[in-house]
Image: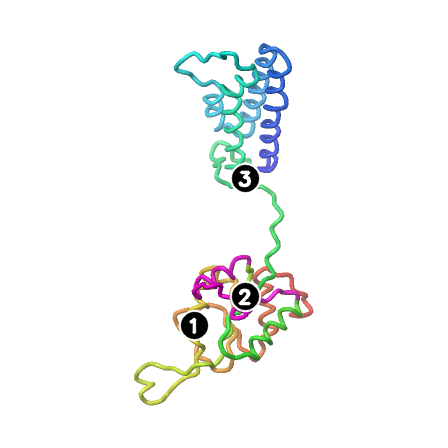
């Protein structure tokens, strides 16, 4: 039996506790309610024995508590007394068990090895793409237009209000709900090691904030979901080598391929 089927059956048993047992105490005698409760417990035990056998002992302990004192009804209605002494605890137990299974927090092994994973339809990956950029306006808007043409929803970092946030907070806020990130390495700065700088051997570099935001964005949404487009001979930072760098010479096709690898449906004719 699959996990989703187990969840549905547990929900059915939980509903039956109210619709059958609680209502039996409410509309009929306490004896009839007691009979319906015993029948319900047998149904739960049978189901657990068959599909979640390592849960039977815990259920029996919950269903047959040992009270230190004898509980009296003291004028309370039969259904309210049942709910106070047994029903509420059983309802909470099933709610918690259902939630554990839904969240994959319940360990079915080793006793029940035949339980299969829940078959779920994966959520569509967000088409929001965050563009991190330097001072090259043309590169920024060219990338935005290209993404829109292919059905994406580009978000340009500097066009969004900071709302009083630091750049880190702003990046964290904008990264929520984003499926992919593109970092534009454009030659906005010049730099080199101290020895070479003294000799005026400077190399074109991206802005240092772009390099920082590149690394931070990978930490937020995952390295496979971030690509960098490198303009010309811009120096690439060695401390984040191993990531995807796309040369600007053929960036459109290469970017579509990276988006496809990241899980986006891309028309093969465009690759």
Q: Mark 2 points at which residue?
A: 130
Q: Mark 3 points at which residue?
A: 102
Rendered location of residue 74, percent (x, y)? 49, 12
Location of residue 107 with respect to 42 vertically, above or below = below
User: Sequence-wise, which precedes: disc 2 or disc 3?
Assistant: 3
From which residue to which does the magenta span run?
Answer: 151-177
Camera-nearest residue between 6 and 89:
89
* Crowd around label 3: few <14 · some 14–19 · many ≥20 (10 Å): some
User: Sequence-wise, which precedes: disc 1 or disc 2?
Assistant: 2
The C terminus: image quadrant? bottom right
Q: In this view, does 18 lie to the left or right of 67?
A: right
**Per the image, is 167 magenta?**
yes
Tell us which disc is closer to us: 1 or 3: 1
Rendered location of residue 154, percent (x, y)? 59, 67
Alpha carbons under labels 2 and 3: distance apart: 31 Å
Residue at disc 2, secondary structure: strand
Rendered location of residue 233, percent (x, y)? 47, 82
């Amino acid at each position: 039996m699959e996990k989703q089927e187990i969840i549905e059956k547990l929900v059915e048993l939980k509903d039956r506790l109210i619709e059958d047992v609680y209502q039996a105490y409410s509309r009929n005698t306490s004896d009839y309610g007691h009979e319906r409760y015993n029948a319900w417990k047998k149904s739960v035990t049978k189901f657990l024995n068959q599909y979640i056998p390592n849960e039977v002992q815990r259920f029996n302990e919950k269903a047959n508590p040992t009270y230190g004192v004898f509980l009296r009804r003291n004028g309370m209605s039969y259904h309210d007394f049942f709910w106070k002494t047994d029903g509420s605890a059983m309802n909470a137990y099933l709610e918690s068990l259902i939630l554990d299974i839904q969240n994959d927090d319940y360990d079915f092994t080793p006793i029940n090895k035949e339980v299969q994973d829940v078959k779920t339809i994966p959520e569509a990956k967000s088409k929001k793409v965050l563009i991190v950029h330097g001072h090259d306006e043309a590169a920024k808007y060219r990338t935005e237009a290209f993404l829109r043409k292919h059905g994406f929803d580009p978000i340009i970092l500097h066009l969004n209000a900071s709302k009083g946030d630091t750049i880190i907070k702003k990046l964290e806020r904008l990264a929520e709900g984003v499926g992919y990130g593109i970092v534009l390495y454009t030659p906005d700065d010049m730099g080199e090691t101290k020895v070479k700088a003294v000799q005026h051997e400077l190399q074109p570099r991206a802005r240092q904030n772009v390099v920082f935001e590149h690394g931070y964005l990978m930490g937020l949404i995952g390295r496979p979901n971030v690509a960098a487009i490198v303009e010309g001979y811009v120096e690439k930072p060695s401390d984040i080598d191993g990531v995807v760098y796309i040369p600007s010479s053929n960036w459109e096709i290469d970017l579509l391929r990276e988006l496809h690898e990241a899980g986006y449906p891309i028309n093969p004719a465009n690759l």
